[in-house]
Image: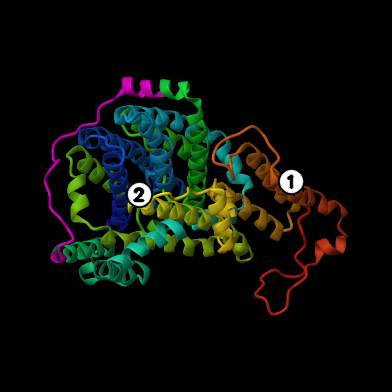
Amino acid sequence: MTAAAYDYKLFTRSDFSAFWALFTDNLVNLLILSGICQFVFQMPADLVYGRIVPGAALAIIAGVAVYTLLAKRAAAQKGADVTALPYGISTPVMFVYLFGVIGPIYWATDDPMLAWQVGIGAGFMGGIVAALGAIVGPFLKRITPRAGMLGTLCGIALVFIGSVPLAEIFENPIIGFTSLLFILWGLIGRFRLPGNLPAGLVAIAAGTIIAIVLGKSTISVEGIGFYPPIPYLGDMLAGIQYLFANPELFLVLIPVQIYNFIETMNNVESAEAAGDHYPVAVCQVTDGAGTMVGALFGSPFPTTVYIGHPAYKRLDAHAGYIVGVALVIAVAAFFGLLSFLAGLIPIAAAAPVLVFVSVSLMTNTTFAVKTTHMAAVAFAILPHISAFLMVKWGALLNALRSSGVEGLPGLGDTNLTAALLMEGAHYEGHLALSQGAILTGLIWGAIVADVIDGRFQHAGRFAFAAAVMSSVGIIHSATLQAPQFDGITVGYLIIAAFLLTYPRFAPKEDLEHRIIVPDEPDFIDEDTPAQYT
């Protein structure tokens, strides 16, 4: 069906509920990055709200324009309505840029302006790396089992998008529970609210009203003004020059941008599992280009296709919800309204919307993969739990130092590691799993799914690829390194060698019949043969 023959409406009433979910996600990211830049890295308010935030808003506008056109094209090709891909600042990568690039420069030089220049230089170079993902993205998507890609997203959704906001709800239960009630009623239970009001809007509004009554919400007009996005080519080039003078920063930059284009690939796969097909290469180029636009106009933070498309699909959103988010974020950024919204809307009022996005992604995954592959999904989730533990352990030590405790060892201290092990906390293992968790989850999900299908050699190739990445530090290491054969790399090679050779020497009977464990939930038929690949 051609575009002329099918009328795809960009805006529908259902976009309104989806708008509040995506707007909340983007707003929280902007509030976090602006607060850290201003109060941790001592950047002046006019730099944060006059350059960084408008640049981020422009990057979002640029990406949304492309994804709106892609949605129209996809609807024309499908002959049915589609949901546009959600888009915004990548949350995990944002934290890496804050504390892996901007922070070290600031702490080493005590110069917030230089830290910002290096940040936008790193953002531009990172955008190039992300766009180059278009070369390998379609190939990776073709060879990687869906369980691996969606499973690693479920890990992110579970620990960062779901559990952290849920904890914030329980910290402020009167506000959070009230907001959560409307999410359960209207978005998870799918019941109609009075007047057909969108549940996301009602949830945030109800939580905000209660916060105002309880005195936990503030209204301030300070900082309101006009802050148009302006290109900062000279500052960006100065930052790039500093990067090449200190190439060790690329050891942080390159792996995290590899993560970013893998995240885009996974999220596009998530959309396809929900019924909407988008070209992964075009999406990766768009994310890279959006990041470069943002960097040129003052924002160091990479943009990406967001996790959670199935949630917006479930709400029957079209493209209007991403257009609305781009416009509102732009108005808030260009007119200095971000600080006003930060004081007005408490996080506990918005957190239930993020919990809904997390739950919807995991629910959709159970329908999008084969039942037999749920073991692979579960395996892909596990590295993200380690990543979560590492973040919280680090936060605990920082909190103790901030509260005045002196002489604390750092994470990785030999004595502390031994003491943690005595208490059953396996620091070294969790550290290894946390480094490159999204790739580790994807790889192990793929290996498990391929073994379940009897595609032993295919699984072996994934294990060998993991050995290569481990040896050079892409996974299980804090930085890139010269190839080395540590225990983890050797372990991957052992698994790869077995999986690659087993089909050649195994008895035919073993490959054609499986052992079914009695009294265990098992969805694999004993006469399902291996595929010999």
Q: Residue 237 magenta-drawn?
A: yes
Tell me where residue 484 appears, x and y as whole percent. Answer: 68, 37
N-terminal-most mark, 2 or 1: 2
Q: Relative to the observer, which residue lies in front, 381 or 394? A: 394
Classify 10 Å Cα crowding around label 2: few (below 14), some (14-19), many (20 and above): many
The residue singled out by tag 1 in the image is 493
Decide: marks 2, 1 in contact (CB < 8 A)? no
Q: Relative to the observer, which residue lies in front, 393 or 387? A: 393
Q: Main secondary structure of the magenta part?
A: loop
Q: Residue 275 magenta-drawn?
A: no
Tell me where residue 280 appears, x and y as whole percent. Answer: 51, 42
Q: Residue at x 72, y 78 (%)?
A: 518
User: Above or below — where is 446 with respect to 464?
Assistant: below
Whether residue 70 is visible, yes or no, is no
Decide if residue 296 is on the left or right side of residue 386: left
Tell me where residue 450 appears, x and y as whole percent. Answer: 68, 55
User: What is the quadrant of residue 346 in the picture?
Assistant: bottom left
Q: Residue at x 14, y 62 (%)?
A: 215
The residue singled out by tag 2 in the image is 8
Q: Nearer the viewer, mark 2 or mark 1?
A: 1
Q: Which mark is residue 276?
A: none
- The residues bearing labels 2 and 1 have C-alpha atoms spaced at a distance of 51 Å
User: Which structural element holds mark 1?
Assistant: helix
